[in-house]
Image (cartoon, coloured by chain):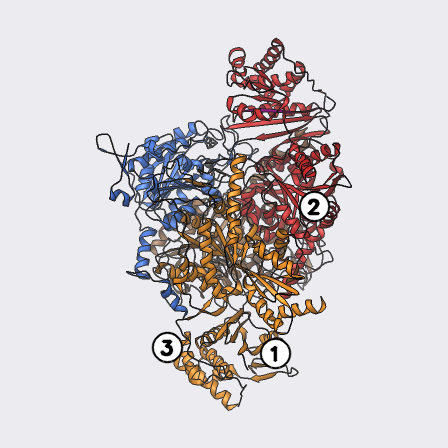
Chain colours: A blue, B brown, C red, D orange
Amino acid sequence: MAEVRTADAEKTGTTERSGDEGRVVKRKLKDYRSEVKPTWCPGCGDFGVLAALQRALAERDLDPKDVVIVSGIGCSGRLPEFVNAYGLHVVHGRALPAAQGVKAANPDLTVIAVGGDGDGFAIGGGHVPHAVRRNQDITYIVMDNQVYGLTKGQPSPSTPTGMQALRRSVSMPKMAPYEGVLEGQLNILAMVIVYGCSFVARTFSSQATEMAKTIGRGLDHPGFAFVHAMSPCPTFYNTYDPWKESFMPLPEGWDTGDRIKAIDMAMEEVGDGVFHSGVFFQEEYRTYTDKLQDVYTKAYGDEQATIDALMDQYA
Amino acid sequence: MAEVRTADAEKTGTTERSGDEGRVVKRKLKDYRSEVKPTWCPGCGDFGVLAALQRALAERDLDPKDVVIVSGIGCSGRLPEFVNAYGLHVVHGRALPAAQGVKAANPDLTVIAVGGDGDGFAIGGGHVPHAVRRNQDITYIVMDNQVYGLTKGQPSPSTPTGMQALRRSVSMPKMAPYEGVLEGQLNILAMVIVYGCSFVARTFSSQATEMAKTIGRGLDHPGFAFVHAMSPCPTFYNTYDPWKESFMPLPEGWDTGDRIKAIDMAMEEVGDGVFHSGVFFQEEYRTYTDKLQDVYTKAYGDEQATIDALMDQYA
Amino acid sequence: MDQLDLTIRIAGENGEGVLTVGDVLAEALARSGLHIYTFKNLPAEIKGGASMTQVRVQDTPVRSPGDALDILMVWNQENYDIHVGEVKPSGVVIFDPDECEADESLALTQIAVPLQKITKTVIKTMKSKNVLAFGILTTFLGIPVEAAKQMVAESRWGRRKEFLESNINALKQAYIYVADNDIDLGLSVPVNQRNGHAQLIMTGNDALCMGALAAGCRYYAGYPITPASDVMETLAKAMPRVGGVLMQTEDEIAAITASIGASFTGAKVMTATAGPGLSLMVEALGLATMEEIPMVVVDVQRGGPSTGMPTKTEQSDLNLAIYGAHGEAPRIVIAATNTEDCFYTAVKAFNLAEKYQTPVIMLSDQHLSQRAQVMSRPDLSRIEIVERKQPEVNGSVSPQEFDRYEMTDDYVSPMPLPGRHGQHYVATGLEHDEHAHIDYSPEAHIRMTEKRHQKIESAVNEPGFVQRYGAEDAQLGLIGWGSSEGPILEALDRTLAKGYKVAALIFKMLQPLPEKEARAFIESIPVVSVVELNASGQFANYLQGRLAVSLKRFNIITGLPFKAGDIEEYIEGVLQYG
Amino acid sequence: MDQLDLTIRIAGENGEGVLTVGDVLAEALARSGLHIYTFKNLPAEIKGGASMTQVRVQDTPVRSPGDALDILMVWNQENYDIHVGEVKPSGVVIFDPDECEADESLALTQIAVPLQKITKTVIKTMKSKNVLAFGILTTFLGIPVEAAKQMVAESRWGRRKEFLESNINALKQAYIYVADNDIDLGLSVPVNQRNGHAQLIMTGNDALCMGALAAGCRYYAGYPITPASDVMETLAKAMPRVGGVLMQTEDEIAAITASIGASFTGAKVMTATAGPGLSLMVEALGLATMEEIPMVVVDVQRGGPSTGMPTKTEQSDLNLAIYGAHGEAPRIVIAATNTEDCFYTAVKAFNLAEKYQTPVIMLSDQHLSQRAQVMSRPDLSRIEIVERKQPEVNGSVSPQEFDRYEMTDDYVSPMPLPGRHGQHYVATGLEHDEHAHIDYSPEAHIRMTEKRHQKIESAVNEPGFVQRYGAEDAQLGLIGWGSSEGPILEALDRTLAKGYKVAALIFKMLQPLPEKEARAFIESIPVVSVVELNASGQFANYLQGRLAVSLKRFNIITGLPFKAGDIEEYIEGVLQYG
Ligand SMILES: Cc1ncc(C[n+]2csc(CCOP(=O)(O)OP(=O)(O)O)c2C)c(N)n1
Ligand SMILES: Cc1ncc(C[n+]2csc(CCOP(=O)(O)OP(=O)(O)O)c2C)c(N)n1
Ligand code: SF4
Ligand code: SF4
Ligand SMILES: [Mg+2]
Ligand SMILES: [Mg+2]
């Protein structure tokens, strides 16, 4: 299939291809598959997240050259390698700062940050509130398996308190051999809402269509979008069965505009043993890029300053 | 005045002194003053916090040798130097991890962590949720002036959005000269509640008695206590006037046992331009130290293992 | 065979079970009174990818992973192709004929054993393929079936009662297959009863943990990272048994500052990490130097830079260990050489930290930390434990008069502990005077800088951190540090036996540098070469910097440990061709 | 006075205004066509503590802060006591007799000027005490009152219209007081009109910012830290004026990773910090080396270790700059020598980063960064700007065929940019092959290690980073780096003038090390000494490590910059007494 680029597509970064009969054909999921085969364990929830993301990209027909997927370290952090797009695989916990640099330097790019619950809320936890504060148009997908997968099964900030080697399929005994995990479990979805995030949603890797839709809504949202993608680790902490039971959609007619209600729901569902899926909260604020436009208007108006002009203040 | 220690006082760490007539006299505020004169600017809110803390210590008559005050870097981080007690002044942003190490290694100590809004919620922000999760009996006093004092006036995570050099008394123009601060303002009190903190209160350095009482309640609380101590920086961001207006006590009969209501209040007051003072939330959970006792019961019961016994597993 | 020395490698797809076969074989041989040394090479993925495990067995302590292979067992074609080149001319390849095709052109004994087929058709429990493979190996090694049965029973396989029957059957089938096909390699590895009490089978990380606990470590904070996670996991179980506290922190910065906090109260503390974590810790390491806080930081080195090669070995964090931190922040840096030494070096690390009130970085590496070796059980009653210099309890000096950083003869000052001593003070990372008061005067900075440096420099007089081996009149001297000791000494013995005049100097203390020994060695030998697993010759550069001498270098950066053969070849090359 | 050379110091309580007097005096003298060099010594507290500011003025470029003082003005007793010992025998002390008592035993001209009283009783606006002090100085310097008035009008005092009248009055009162008391030092500092366009008054941080913008820097991320905050604050204003983005991040780790992200898209990026921040950045620096991402990291060194002495100067982060990061993570390290050089070195830092696709650490220090100097306005049209090697836009190579880390002759590979090039790839901190695919094979690691090292090593051929000065047949050679250039060269000129045979070699590039020049210098001179502001001789050790030569050292660790006199004395000491 030959590629045909219109001048316009070039500018906006979308590419269209002509089919046999000259019809314009959009990209398909497989166009976002890289030549690298995922290295995850069979059954890993991350396969679902990968496919959902690829589907969401395909539905939006984004040119791979205009998409940057940024990740830290973890099983989940390997995702960019498997997508046919630009990828930036940084150090553990720093996907968000790196993604913010990408977006700030080139706001035309579609920027997606991905990573695990440990990457995002243990070592990287300090960056989340600040990424939220900047409200850049970035979609952040946290693949939460409530465990450190890559380092073989230590508890993470989202591991339930008291968790240990209870069932055969759960192999997290090493770090908490006596009384299970002593620390409280973080409610990362509620946290992100309180930080002031403009789009907050939850979805489950076993619900493929739903997840693609939710990620897609995150991509479409102009501002920082947080997608809590529950994605089990069958190797070190197999939560498929309980999660299948506890997942349910947000109540019919859920008002995504009420931040306080969204927090309350996120706080209360824990006690109820429920994971709600769907968009908890969404509101459009001006993005960092929007605000920068105002700054530029004040800083230079029509024409940027020359360096010589900047140096005049020292004369 | 000679010191008289009863065997019991020795054990519990309190020291009592005999007055001239042999009466037992409790320590006074001045007993917690170190020989170092505070180096803060005249009018700095931190003087109020220092005095309130000293008063709370005096009221509890704690032996300075059993008190450790841990801080990071910032004007506020200098506080330990001015208190007659043990102090551990670490690097920027790491007061909480250090305090946790102190408490874990010697649970009999009274451990207080202090620091600024930048120290605690910018560079150190990643540690807060985890300190909360561990629920050690530590009192964490954040001296929030909504600015970086020590580095001379840059905006902090709690600086209101849009803030810049609006008034003469506010000298925060350098970092946000065009449109003011572009980033959202963090609601640190709400955040800490969502993290799962077992004691969360706010108080104002200009309300001395109130502040000493609130800090005292934090010290008495068995678990991680967060005290949001609003403490203006007249040199770089003079908020005395507006804060005096916006401070008000929590509503009469406030239920400190309702976490959800506490969050809602913390989220809503911002829009109302109000700072509530008082204890937003308090609940007693088992502390880390309590839980460790259970671990020890399981791990060794009555008698600790010898190293030789531990090595048997490799034989 | 005068001296037993066999190197056996088992290779297959990661996750298939080859590692278990290797582990059980190593443990069983070790339990039979033999010395073993294992070596694994794994992909970083959790599952999938070619992976191999190797056991070298001798009747005396083993010092390196082994050179060419005596026995190679491969489970599929990929692994056949990867490993077959490393088999000795006299060696044996065992392959599964249904999974791979042997290269008939090779002058090797190649024996087909249909592992997969036997398991499927005869044993019928796929889980027992491991045991079948194990049995093939034990029968080849000449181990009687009864002894092998006991080995299986005592292994992790034995613990899973529900599979025990099929496992024992698998073992039997192995012996039957070998007998039926009349295979005999003529080996008879002696299996006796080892004295379980006197001999331990440990990895470097195991030994390090036990050494730390023996030295009195009662607080550990850490964040998981390959290949240091084992340390935390082992201690998670062991620490509470001795009344200590272990915290899994949110990152390495929290781990090291929590450790500083704990040590401030008098606890003996440790944290362990790998390169990326050490990089994050250097700011707080400087703090510990400045506040004179004792602590042990273990760095289990892996292939760098950046995330690098997490499952490979390298000695490339030395620069960071010595120089990592802004300003002049001296600390002690030591390195362990082998499994047993991990135990004793950990003890010494704590003793040095407490004695000099300083952070001590103890270097290990992926290979040293994860391979299993046999070691003598340490006699704990003979271990010296050093305690921190403290003021008198109930001493009458007031806090106002007490100098936390008193200038003593040895530059080490008594350290009051909260809850224990009335001499409270405020430790600070800002420059300070003797009284711990903040002081930026040139005089205070000069005095305290000297205190911090001299204290560390004087640790160079501690015995046992540098050792010379080999010929007095050597023509070639090798300098090594840490885990390359074993292969260097093995190569030394081999070349000495061939008549070469070689010597070696092994450093376990890197900072302060034992300059006297280094200079004496270098000046007494015409050619001296520094042997290390890194690209730039980090230790060589450091030695040159301190001694102003010129050194040759022998560096390997394959992500794999030195083989004795590599070094043997190097020695012969230098001495034959200059 | 053939050559104008005066060193004037003003000292008082921090926050009282002495710094402003010094700043205005320095600016005014500079605006009069003279060369100035300021030097401040402040406490770390926001207010309170003794603080001083100093201006050295010459009619040719000034190279060091000045030795003994020609004029000392003190506002109180504490400062009198601290500073009076530094006044030249021929010098003058101006003191406030109501605030302090002069030591009459000193053989100095000591002039009482009741600053406080005149302000209170005659001027009646306390804010104007600064101007009174300024006027006393200008009249002492022989500056006509009209010229001084214009100086005040053009200064920051002139901008505050409401105080202008009282300020002008204060100035007048100064001239009246001096005339009334018949004081005349016989000085007449020439005040002409400087060519404002051709000459700039800048601090090192100002110059660095302008250099960065001139080089094309359009993204900055940073976290405040003394003494690097000025860089961020200056750019916060300037960056938006040229369409760039500046982000104040939540910490230094975010700053450097955000910079990496921005550079990944093709932006020229910078972050600036001091020691503690650099310590936190080393993990990500290793990532930038591994992913071959261009970036400039400025380290404005201050007194260490740990939080140390934030307002003091030191050259003690060199080890960290060169070696900070686990694994083998080479990067380029350069250092600026003076204010003007901060501009050009910043430009070069960007050019090196882009050309070699690597992080470049640019070292400055507290003194260099904050003192003011006069420099010629750079001719921007003559500055060479290097752009990153990129693939063809609209090139037809598919991402599957494209090798991001292609092995080229110069080891630098074309770097595709998102949004611009169709050759998308995944940059990773794991070891990888040419195609950017993860690869832990020995071969890939060896190839890529070589690529990363050779690329950096070849930068040693860049011109202008090392310079020899002084006698061809020198008996003593001094080696310096970065900001000690000025005092070294001034001392060199003084001692050459006295007939000593000395030479100097100044390095602005530290890694890669210009070995050829270093060796030639060292081998040609009998005694060579490395002059640096740190305790352990970091550069000396590094040179010895690379060159295997033995060097003398001259180190000062007072937290203050070198004076030319310190080095002059050292030279004379070595050459007279060996
Ligand atoms: C600085 C640093 N510390 C630790 C590690 C080791 N490490 C790699 S991934 C990981 C955590 C993985 O957990 P998570 O982020 O939840 O991802 P998952 O593997 O579960 O997808 C850790 C601790 C590292 N690579 N770098
Ligand atoms: C790693 C590191 N980065 C930056 C700094 C510089 N620094 C010191 S205090 C501070 C922030 C102070 O603000 P805050 O925590 O709010 O305390 P305040 O001075 O307002 O009380 C900063 C950025 C530092 N000391 N260390
Ligand atoms: S270890 Fe868990 S998270 Fe990692 S790839 Fe396997 S199943 Fe997925
Ligand atoms: S700068 Fe602000 S916070 Fe710091 S001491 Fe002064 S008033 Fe207080
Ligand atoms: Mg996870
Ligand atoms: Mg603050």
What residue sits 68% from the left and 68% below the top? D575
Check if mark 2 and mark 3 are on a common chain.
no
Q: Does the image show residue B173?
A: no
The reply to whether dot 3 and dot 1 touch (C-beta < 8 Å) is no
Label 3 secondary element = helix
Q: Position of residue C207 (x, y in %)?
A: 66, 35
Q: How far apart are the two marked residues, 2 and 3, measured between alpha carbons?
A: 68 Å
Label 1 secondary element = strand
| Residue at mark 3: C-beta within 8 A of ligand 4 | no
Q: Residues within 10 Å of mark 1 (few under 14, many from 20)?
A: some
Query: Of the residues shown, which amino acid type is indicated by label 1?
Result: Lys
Identify the residue position indicated by label 1 in the image.
D88
- Count of numbered marks: 3
Along the line of sight, the residue nearer the viewer: C140 or D376: D376
Quarter the C terminus of chain C occupies: top right
Identify the residue position indicated by label 2 in the image.
C351
Q: Residues within 10 Å of mark 2 (few under 14, many from 20)?
A: many
Identify the residue position indicated by label 3 in the image.
D161
Q: Is residue C559 left or right of residue D345?
A: right
Residue mark closest to the camera, 1 vs 2: 1
Query: Of the residues shown, which amino acid type is indicated by label 3?
Result: Lys
Which secondary structure dominates the residues rendered in magenta? strand
Q: How far apart are the two marked residues, 1 and 2, measured between alpha carbons?
A: 53 Å
Q: How far apart are the two marked residues, 3 and 1, measured between alpha carbons?
A: 39 Å
Which residues are drawn in magenta?
A: C7-11
Q: Position of residue D413 (x, y in %)?
A: 44, 44
